[in-house]
Amino acid sequence: MWVIAILAGLLGLIILVLCMPVDTTVSIEAPAKPWFRLRLAWLFGLIDKELKGTGGKRPSRKKPKKRKAPDIGMILDIMTTRGLLSKFTSLTKELLGQLNIREFTLNCRLGFPDPADSGMLCALLGATAAFLNLPDKYRLRLEPSFSNEPVFDGHIQGSIRLQPIKLVWPI
C-alpha cells in the first residue's frame, strides 16, 4: 500500500514539475564577429542556465571513424511511406502551436554583392511584414545596404515560453 502511495506521489510531483513553464531567451548580434547568448530559465527562475558564444575559428577535432553509408533504398522507402508527410506536418503544427512567443526583435542591415538582389529581398520582406500587421511585441526593422559587397550586421532577440506538459499529447 505504501509503495502505491509513494509511486502516486512521485508521479504527481513529476506532473507538477512538467507544468512549470520554461522561458527561453535568444540574442544574436552580428557585427564583424557573430555573438550569441541563450538563456534557459525553469521553475520561475530557480533553475537558470546561460550559454554564451562568439564566432570565429572552430576547435579542431579528431577525425571521426568512417561509418557505413546509409542504404539509399531504405531511406527512399521511408520517405515515400503513404501518410508520413501529412503526419509529420500535423505534428510540427501542433508542437509549434504550443510555443508562446513573448517577444521577437529583428534589427539588421542586409546587403548582397548585387544591389538589385538587396533591394528585391528587402522589398519582399518589408511588404510581407506590412501585410501581416504584426502586434507590437514583434518588431522588425530591415535596412538594405546597396554597396557592392555582402553585408550582414544586426541584432536578433527572441523570448519564448512553453510548458513541457503540453508537448506530451502531440508527441
Image (cartoon, rainbow, N blue to C red):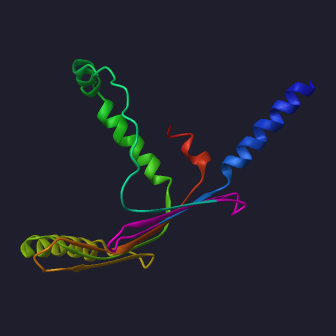
Say which residue appears at 34% left-offset and 41% top-offset.
Answer: 89
Tell me which residue sits at (63%, 57%) in the image.
Answer: 21
Q: Residue at (28%, 22%) from the top-left corner?
A: 69
Drawn side of residue 31 relative to residue 137, left or right: left
Q: In the image shown, does 110 or 82 lie closer to the viewer?
A: 110
Q: Is residue 34 magenta?
A: yes
Taking depth in this image into account, of 80 and 120 the one nearest to the observer is 120
Q: Is residue 118 left or right of residue 35?
A: left
Q: Which residues are magenta?
A: 27-48
Between 112 and 167, which is closer to the camera in this rendering? 112
- Residue 131 drawn in magenta: no
Place of residue 158 in the rendered image (x, y in percent of width and height, measured from the top left): 46, 67
Residue 108 locus on image (x, y percent) = 30, 76
Q: Position of residue 94 (x, y in %)?
A: 44, 47
State the image quarter where residue 28 is shown.
bottom left
Asked where in the image residue 153 lies, by quadrant, the reply is bottom left
Q: Nearer the viewer, residue 5 or 32?
A: 32
**Residue 151: x, y in percent?**
22, 73
Vertical position of residue 72 compared to residue 61: above or below? above
Image-based side of 144 in relation to 160, left or right: left
